[in-house]
Image (tube, rainbow, N blue to C red):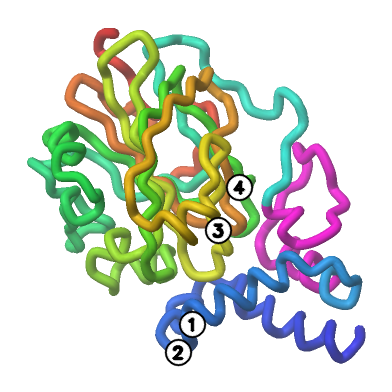
Amino acid sequence: MTPVGGMMAGVMRVLLHEDVNFLLTNRLPRRLATRFVGRVARAEHPMVRVPAIALWRVFGDVDLSDSAETRFRSLRHGFTRALKSGARHFDPDPAVVASPCDAIVGAHGAIEGDRLHQVKGFPYRLRDLLPDPAVADRFRGGSFVTLRLTAGMYHRFHAPHDLIVEGVTYLSGDCWNVNPIALKRVERLFCRNERAVIEARLANSQISMLLVPVAAILVASIRLHCLDTERMLREIGSTRVPCAATLAKGAEMGWFEHGSTILVFLPKGVTLDFEVEEGRPIRAGEPLARLQAL
């Protein structure tokens, strides 16, 4: 291995181990680390690309058995890979709200007023997470699910139901790690990090739902098909941008350029599926919640 490859191997080996990620968020400038990994992920030169992808595959526990491609021109290309046609099945039952992504289920349950938790003992409030109190009020007494994507997972996310996306607010913020170690130590972490608040309504109904992709350390960006999120963050800032995108259940909504978290918020009248359990892996398309009535 070349000297550059050896250096990259050492860096990637550290960055891809979750048990040291919290130390990174304390000891390294998070923005600097994120920009560095973003550059590494985009690099197509073999001296950078080959060791980076090799170490990602080994230490990120990557499964490419259902990937449309297995050879990548950059680490970013691997992170944002598409799947083979039919690799994820979205339950067509209109009563089922599906998981928008492959993930590990984290904290979930009832929203008590506007209070919920990132892990036991670490509460936060919807009004601190969301920019508009009126939007937060729609989900008082509803339910929530935290979906954590790891580095090796499929990074694209999809419409969990037939949806109309009505608005997006992209909020600039910090980039704390969102792994379980950090969630147990950093209060109101999701409220501090960069995030996109996606306001949606289930098609042919007045049932609202929120999807909040949260960026984290080493996440180069969140991308959405319905809006130019790069321009939003660079030029528009945290202003809400109206939208009228109609998406069929299972349609691709966007992607992370590294693993992170999606928070799903549901109003009263939508019940979490009985199989949703903390620590359980879930795949895009599998049942996440059920509507009591449309």
**Residue annotated with mark 4:** 155
Q: Indicate which disc residue 211 carries.
A: none
Q: Earlier in the sequence, mark 2 or mark 4?
A: 2
User: Tag 3: residue type?
Assistant: Ser
Picture residue at 27% right of the left edge, 19% below the top:
207
Question: 10 Å neighbourhood of mark 1: few (<14), some, or many (≥20)?
Answer: some
Q: Where in the figure is residue 40, as x and y percent of width and height?
A: 72, 72
The quadrant of the rendering that contains the N terminus is bottom right
Q: Are marks 1 and 4 in contact (CB under 8 Å)?
A: no
Figure disc tally = 4
Which callout, 3 or 4, points at the residue further toward the start of the chain?
Answer: 4
SS at badge 2 = helix
Picture residue at 53% right of the left edge, 35% below the top: 226
Label annotation for residue 221: 3
Q: Quadrant of residue 187?
A: bottom left
- Residues shaded magenta: 50-79
Tell me residue 255's x, y (percent): 58, 46
Of marks 3 and 4, the one in the foreground: 3
Which residue is farthest front? 235
- CB contact under 8 Å: marks 2 and 1: yes
| Residue 243, horizontal then vertical, whole percent | 42, 31
Q: Where is mark 1, residue-wise?
A: 24
Q: Which residue is mark 2?
A: 27
- Foreground disc of the pair 3, 2: 3
